[in-house]
Image (cartoon, rainbow, N blue to C red):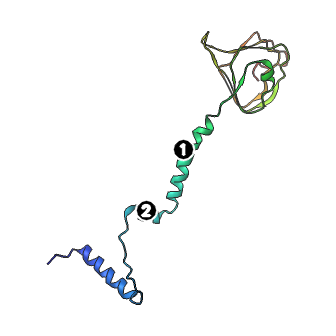
């Protein structure tokens, strides 16, 4: 004869009770033990959807953040940048006095490194500020031969 453990007795009692409650049914319904992951999911039903959402964000966020910046290689392209967005200067640019100051810039303007000189590409000959107001980011920008005329608060970048 097999020795009964407390667990066996509880399971047996539950089966008998369940059979008695559902005696009219043709199938006896048994209660199955619940594993710990299922218990925690029942206590916090938002955990699974939340973890799926976090995984999607972790997968999609880098793809969105790695959008290529718009390349700028001449003064016409520099004149046509918007007030936001990511831009990268990939060639030396000389202003022929045709540049017009942009209003408020909220994006990113960066100068790439020239592989022949190992220095950032330059903008030379500016006679007007790049931006009236700068709330974005400017990186690695080299300005040469800049002659800005204006009030005491006029600068080459903003």
The quadrant the C terminus occupies is top right
Q: Whole-Å distance between the Cαs marked 2 and 1?
A: 24 Å
* 142 to 6, vertically: above or below: above
Q: Residue at x 41, y 90 (%)?
A: 24
**Residue 23, quarter of the rendered image:** bottom left
Q: Nearer the viewer, mark 2 or mark 1?
A: 1
Instruction: Please give the label number shown on residue 7.
Output: none
Q: Residue at x 52, y 48 (%)?
A: 55
Helix, strand or loop status at disc 2: helix
Upstream in sequence: badge 2 or badge 1: 2
Residue 35 appears at what percent x and percent y?
Answer: 37, 64
Instruction: Please give the label number shown on residue 40.
Output: 2
Label 2 with label 1: CB-CB less than 8 Å: no
Residue 33 appears at what percent x and percent y?
Answer: 35, 70
Mark 1 neighbour class, 10 Å CA radius: few under 14, some 14 to 19, many 20 or more: few
Instruction: Report the number of discs.
Output: 2
Residue at the extreme front: 26
Identify residue for label 1.
Answer: 58
156 displayed left or right of 22: right
Can the viewer see residue 149 in this picture? yes
Helix, strand or loop status at disc 1: helix
């Amino acid at each position: 004869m097999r020795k009964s453990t407390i667990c066996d007795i509880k399971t047996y009692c539950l089966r008998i009770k369940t059979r008695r409650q559902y005696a009219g049914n043709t199938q006896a319904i048994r209660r199955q033990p619940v594993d710990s992951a299922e218990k925690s999911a029942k206590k916090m039903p938002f955990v699974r959807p939340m973890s799926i959402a976090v995984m999607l964000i972790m997968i999609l966020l880098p793809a969105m953040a790695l959008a290529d910046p718009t390349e700028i290689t001449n003064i016409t392209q520099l004149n046509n940048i918007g007030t936001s967005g990511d831009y990268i200067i990939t060639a030396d640019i000389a202003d022929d006095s045709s540049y017009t100051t942009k209003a408020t810039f909220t994006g990113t303007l960066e100068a790439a490194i020239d592989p022949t000189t190992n220095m950032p590409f330059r903008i030379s000959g500016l006679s007007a500020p790049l931006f009236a107001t700068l709330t974005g980011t400017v990186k690695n920008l080299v300005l040469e031969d800049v002659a800005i005329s204006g009030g005491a608060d006029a600068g080459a970048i903003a």
